[in-house]
Image: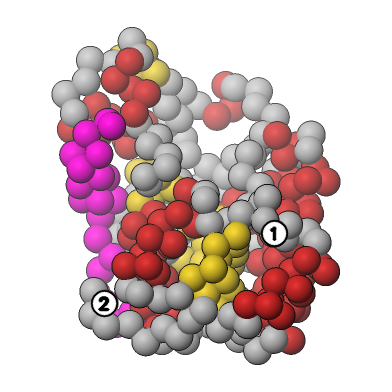
C-alpha cells in the first residue's frame, strides 16, 4: 500500500474485537498513532465517558468497531443491543462533531429486507425484516451517524479474520449443514481495513458498501472450503425456513460495491474466493 495521508491520533473503540484488532494492526504498521479502547475501558453507551475520552485524547479520527453482534440473542437482550448498536453510535457522532473529529462506523446488510437477487446499493430503501432486532438496532446507529455529513459508515458482512476463523471447525466435523438460501460473500477483515485506510486518506464521508465482485450462498462457501482443504466433512444443505431460529436473516445479502470502486479509483475489488483461499492457506488452521 502506498503512503497514507492519515493524521492521528485515532481513537479506536472495540480495539480487541474481530474488526478492531485488524484496524489496530494496520494503523500501527503505518505508524499512525492509535489509542485503543475496549468495553472495559470505554462504554459507548455512556455519553459522559465518551466526552471525557475525546477531551483527553483529542483524536482526529474516531473509529467505532464496537457492536452487539449476536443476532439471535438480540431478540431477548433487546436493550443491550439497542444501547450498543443504536445509542452508542449516536452519542459518538455528536461528540465527534463537537470535537471536530471524523467518525467511522460499521453497519450491515441486515438493514435490508433481503428480497430479490439484485445487489443492494447504498441508496436502496432500508427495511429490516420482522423479528430482526439486530438489523433494527444497526439501522438506528447508521442513521444517527449519517445525520452528520462529515462521518463515514461502511456496511460489511460475513466477516472472518485472525480472531474468527469461521471455517476451522470443519476439519473436526463428520457433517455440517450450511444454508443454501442465504446469499452474500464471506469477507476478510484484512480487505475491509485496506479499503478503509484509503478512504481515511481521502477524508471520504458518507455511506459505502465493502463487497467483492462476486457472491455465493453459505453452501457454496463451505463447499469451496471443503474442496480447497481436501476435507472429508459431509455437507448437508439446509434452508433458513427449516430452522426456527430466534431471529430472521435476510436471504439476499448481496452488496453492490460500485460506489466504493469509484471512490477508490479501481476496476475491481476481487473475488471472495481469492481472499478466502489466501486466508485458509495462510492460517493453516492454527
x 65%, y 23%: residue: 244
- Residue 142: give x, y in percent of width and height: 66, 66
Give the alpha-carbon distance from disc 1 to disc 2, as whole Å.
37 Å
Q: Which residue is tagged 1?
A: 42
**Can residue 272 be seen by looking at this rendering?**
yes
Left or right, 262 with respect to 132, comes to: left
x 45%, y 30%: residue: 179
- Residue 188: give x, y in percent of width and height: 35, 51
Instruction: Say what secondary structure mark 2 lies in.
Output: loop
Whether tag 1 and tag 2 are in contact, CB under 8 A, the answer is no
In which quadrant of the rendered view does residue 228 lie? top left
Quarter in which the N terminus is drawn: bottom left
- Does the magenta run of residues contain 279? yes
Residue 232, numbered label: none
Name the residue nearer the viewer: 151 or 126: 151
Name the residue nearer the viewer: 49 or 238: 49
Start and end of the magenta stretch? Answer: 262-286
Whether 117 is drawn above or below 11: the answer is above
Q: Residue furthest top?
A: 174
Amino acid at each position: 500500500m502506498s503512503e497514507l495521508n492519515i493524521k492521528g491520533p485515532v481513537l479506536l473503540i472495540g480495539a480487541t474485537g474481530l474488526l478492531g484488532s485488524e484496524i489496530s494492526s494496520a494503523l500501527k504498521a503505518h505508524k499512525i498513532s492509535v489509542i485503543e479502547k475496549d468495553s472495559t475501558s470505554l462504554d459507548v453507551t455512556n455519553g459522559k465517558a465518551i466526552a471525557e475520552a475525546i477531551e483527553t485524547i483529542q483524536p482526529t479520527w474516531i473509529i467505532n468497531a464496537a457492536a452487539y453482534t449476536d443476532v439471535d440473542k438480540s431478540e431477548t437482550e433487546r436493550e443491550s443491543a439497542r444501547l450498543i448498536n443504536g445509542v452508542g453510535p449516536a452519542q459518538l457522532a455528536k461528540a465527534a462533531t463537537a470535537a471536530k473529529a471524523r467518525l467511522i462506523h460499521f453497519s450491515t446488510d441486515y438493514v435490508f429486507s433481503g428480497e430479490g437477487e439484485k445487489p443492494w446499493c447504498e441508496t436502496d430503501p432500508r427495511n429490516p425484516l420482522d423479528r430482526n432486532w439486530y438489523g433494527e438496532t444497526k439501522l438506528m446507529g447508521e442513521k444517527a451517524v449519517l445525520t452528520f455529513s462529515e462521518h463515514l459508515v461502511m456496511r460489511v458482512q460475513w466477516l472472518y479474520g485472525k480472531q474468527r476463523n469461521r471455517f476451522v471447525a470443519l476439519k473436526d466435523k463428520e457433517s455440517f449443514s450450511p444454508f443454501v438460501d442465504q446469499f452474500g460473500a464471506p469477507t476478510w477483515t484484512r480487505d475491509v481495513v485496506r479499503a478503509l485506510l484509503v478512504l481515511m486518506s481521502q477524508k471520504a464521508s458518507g455511506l459505502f458498501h465493502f463487497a467483492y465482485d462476486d457472491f455465493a450462498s453459505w453452501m457454496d462457501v463451505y463447499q469451496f472450503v471443503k474442496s480447497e482443504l481436501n476435507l472429508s466433512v459431509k455437507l448437508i444443505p439446509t434452508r433458513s425456513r427449516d430452522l426456527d431460529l430466534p431471529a430472521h436473516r435476510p436471504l439476499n445479502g448481496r452488496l453492490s460495491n460500485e460506489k466504493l470502486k469509484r471512490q477508490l479509483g479501481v476496476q475491481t475489488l476481487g473475488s471472495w474466493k481469492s481472499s478466502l483461499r489466501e486466508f485458509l492457506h495462510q492460517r493453516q488452521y492454527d
